Amino acid sequence: MDKYDILEIFRSTGALLEGHFILTSGRHSETYFQCAKVLQYPEYLTLFGRIIADHFDNDNIDTVISPAIGGIVVGTEVGRQLGTKTIFTERKDGTMKLRRGFTVEKGERILIVEDVLTTGGSINELIEIVQENGGKVVGVGVIVDRSGGNIKLHKNQMSVIEYKTISFDENKMPEYLAEIPVQKPGSRNIS
């Protein structure tokens, strides 16, 4: 399956949006990957989960961890396919935390799974949480790498698809984009 086949899956499910979007990072873009739209179809959830799980199949993963909300569905599927425990983090008062009784044990081999990588902020927060608790991050898997492969957060990092998209700081947006009504389809509130 090549990049164009994967993009067609996103387009056919309404998961690749075009317009003016505020990303979770706060940056503005004319494209948005709404992975929840594609992951509502079990065949694509299974497919993308399999691509990620196959990449990490020989890494002796103990636990898959994902950030809420976007990463939970795909993280759980990857964990199911690897036969491992799956947990997630949540934001409380703006800070990413382990909650709901989830823990990371010293020496635990952790795979981080996320739906979309744009700046790497959420993944970096998870890396810190795992390391602060004595765990070992053995890899990072994402469905969509919006950086086109330019952001490397771990030596064992992979994506189902790399798709370089341009994003803009709010104060450096091109005029044509500023004229399009803005949408905020993500899960995190941006002020």
Image: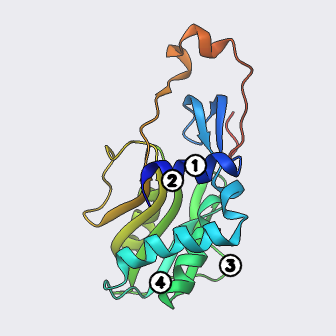
Q: Is residue 8 visible?
A: yes
Q: Nearer the viewer, mark 3 or mark 1?
A: 1
Q: Which residue is mark 2?
A: 5
Dots 3 and 4: beta carbons under 8 Å? Answer: no
Kindly identify the residue that appears in the image at 56 percent across and 81 percent down.
86
Q: Nearer the viewer, mark 2 or mark 4?
A: 2
Q: Is residue 135 visible?
A: no
The amino acid beneath tag 1 is Glu
The amino acid beneath tag 4 is Thr
Dots 3 and 1: beta carbons under 8 Å? Answer: no
The amino acid beneath tag 3 is Arg
In-front residue for pair 124/36: 36
Q: Is residue 155 above or below residue 11?
A: below
Q: Which residue is mark 1?
A: 8
Q: Nearer the viewer, mark 3 or mark 2?
A: 2
Residue 67 lies, in percent from the top left, at: 57, 63
Q: CA distance from mark 4 to mark 1?
A: 31 Å
Classify mark 2: residues with Cα within 10 Å, few (<14), some (14-19) or many (20+). Answer: few
Q: Nearer the viewer, mark 3 or mark 4?
A: 4
| Secondary structure beneath label 4 | strand
Residue 71 lies, in percent from the top left, at: 59, 63
Q: Is residue 167 left or right of residue 16?
A: left
Q: Which mark is residue 63?
A: 4
Q: Which mark is residue 100?
A: 3
Kindly identify the residue that appears in the image at 34 percent across and 88 percent down.
60
Dots 1 and 2: beta carbons under 8 Å? Answer: yes
The amino acid beneath tag 2 is Asp
Q: Nearer the viewer, mark 4 or mark 1?
A: 1
Q: CA distance from mark 3 to mark 4?
A: 16 Å
Q: Is residue 184 above or below residue 10?
A: above
